[in-house]
Image (cartoon, grey):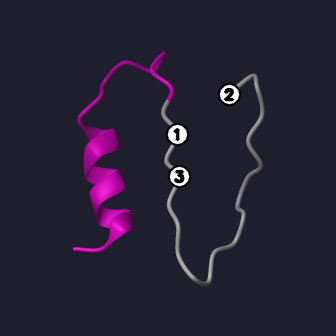
Amino acid sequence: MDIYDMVEDLVNKFDNPNVRMSFITYSTEGHTLMKLTSDR
């Protein structure tokens, strides 16, 4: 199981659309998909 499957399984457990989640992962070949902001 890779990290993407784990995150998807975790997110699917929450039914509340008001819940906000952030996932920060690290690797030797990392890329920023979305910069962190104070309003998220």
Task: Name the residue rendered at 29%, 28% in the picture.
Answer: 14
* Mark 1 vs mark 3, CA separation in Å: 7 Å
Relative height, residue 9 to residue 39 (above, below): below
| Residue under numbered circle 3 | 24
**Pointer 1 residue:** 22
User: The residue under label 1 is which amino acid type?
Assistant: Ser
Q: Which quarter of the figure is the C terminus placed in?
A: top right
Dot 2: element = loop
Report x, y in % for residue 21.
48, 33
**Contact, mark 1 vs mark 3 (Cβ under 8 Å):** yes
Lower position in the chain sequence, tag 2 or tag 3: 3
| Three-letter code, disc 3 | Ile
Q: Is residue 4 above or below residue 9?
A: below
Q: CA distance from mark 2 to mark 1?
A: 8 Å
The numbered disc on residue 12 is none
Quadrant position of residue 28: bottom right
15 magenta-colored: yes
Label 3's element? loop
